[in-house]
């Protein structure tokens, strides 16, 4: 049934001459290329507590999604059926195994957390985010890179993560001792995850003497998520105990500094990480190091820069 549904959408794409392909491709790309940077802007200049909540949600989502992907090891639709032909270059961005959808996970964690945050403040924004979750999920089906179950489980796991992170944040937020214990547990969890994905068995199916899917290439996203969580854990511990970053609201150069910091992070993620740590350490550990550095930069390095260049006398006291 899932392949039949994708073939139905594929027929719709062909019947309409592909006029919707770029729209849905843009929605998908925005979810993974731009949306994951939203938490850092919030952390630097909007709301530090919600910034932490966003960062925790997206990195945790990457790890959990990676664990499920590498446990189930479901092949992509075009591997399961020769009739499936993904739209445009969407196949290039489809990394890892198929189940559950990573794009849907990113969209649901980020749009979902935003919806929770804004539901009582700006209801229209919250509703827009809910619509975008649905559109991103549908885009993965429409483009032919994920089955309906990939999308639905991606949404489900992400909504669960949003709920759990929110629950924990309310229960132990501000309790440094509890947060330190959670940090230690988190580090041990990341170590366990890495051992699991490195040493578990994977399907090794060959067609005409060629391996269908190389398991080593499928581990990249989960390694990246683990690196992000590790950077978050270490960075937040140092920030809480030594840096004590407070948003200098009202500082005239805060917006400019945040834009510069965001530009540096995007440049690192898109270009410089690939030419440095990924080149030196390989695809998996390089991705781990790249995301770890990204998190440490966002939580420690750039807040120090903001503190240095935002004069306290120019800030607004709430």
Image (tube, rainbow, N blue to C red):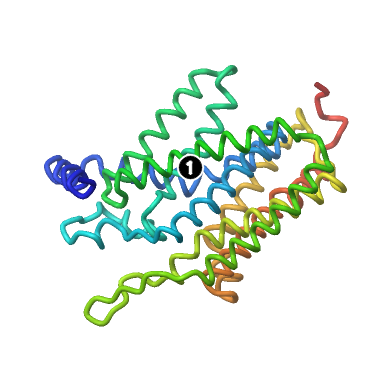
Q: Residue at x 50, y 56 (%)?
A: 67
Which quadrant of the structure image shows residue 234?
bottom right
Q: Is residue 161 left or right of residue 233?
A: left
Which residue is more in the foreground, 157 or 231?
157
Q: Is residue 293 left or right of residue 178?
A: left
Q: Residue furthest bottom?
A: 209
User: Residue beneath label 1, please?
Assistant: 157
Which residue is more in the foreground, 160 or 277?
160
At mark 1, the secondary structure is: helix
Which quadrant of the structure image shows residue 210?
bottom left
- Residue 158 drawn at (x, y percent): 50, 41
- Residue 146 drawn at (x, y percent): 32, 50
How dense is the environment of label 1, judged by Cα within 10 Å: few (below 14), some, or many (20 and up)?
Answer: many
Query: Which image quarter holds the C terminus?
Result: top right
Q: Residue at x 46, y 29 (%)?
A: 129
Look at the picture and state if 223 lies above or below 204: above
Q: Is residue 100 left or right of residue 67?
A: left
Which quadrant of the structure image shows residue 290?
bottom right
- Residue 96 drawn at (x, y percent): 41, 60
């Amino acid at each position: 049934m899932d392949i039949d549904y994708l073939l139905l959408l594929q027929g719709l794409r062909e019947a309409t001459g592909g006029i919707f392909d770029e729209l849905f491709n843009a929605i998908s790309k925005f979810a993974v290329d731009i949306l994951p940077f939203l938490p850092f802007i919030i952390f630097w200049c909007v709301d530090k507590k919600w910034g932490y909540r966003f960062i925790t949600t997206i990195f945790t989502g990457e790890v959990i999604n990676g664990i499920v992907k590498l446990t189930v090891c479901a092949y992509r639709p075009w591997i399961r059926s020769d009739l499936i032909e993904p739209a445009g270059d969407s196949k290039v961005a489809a990394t890892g195994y198929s189940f559950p959808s990573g794009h849907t996970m990113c969209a649901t964690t980020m749009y979902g957390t935003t919806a929770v945050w804004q539901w009582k403040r700006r209801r229209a924004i919250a509703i827009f985010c809910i619509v975008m979750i649905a559109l991103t999920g549908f885009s993965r089906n429409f483009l032919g890179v994920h089955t309906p179950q990939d999308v639905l489980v991606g949404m489900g796991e992400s909504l669960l993560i949003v709920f759990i992170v929110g629950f924990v944040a309310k229960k132990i937020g501000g309790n440094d001792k509890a947060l330190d214990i959670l940090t230690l547990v988190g580090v041990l969890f990341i170590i366990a995850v890495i051992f699991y994905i490195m040493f578990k068995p994977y399907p090794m199916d060959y067609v005409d003497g060629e391996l269908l899917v190389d398991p080593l290439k499928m581990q990249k996203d989960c390694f990246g998520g683990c690196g992000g969580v590790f950077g978050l854990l270490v960075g937040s511990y140092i920030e809480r105990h030594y840096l004590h970053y407070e948003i200098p609201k009202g500082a005239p150069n805060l917006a400019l500094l945040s834009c510069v910091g965001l530009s540096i992070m995007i440049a690192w993620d898109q270009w410089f990480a690939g030419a440095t740590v990924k080149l030196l350490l390989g695809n998996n550990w390089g991705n781990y190091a790249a995301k770890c550095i990204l998190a440490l930069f966002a939580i420690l390095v750039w807040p120090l820069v903001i503190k240095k260049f935002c004069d306290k006398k120019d800030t607004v006291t709430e």
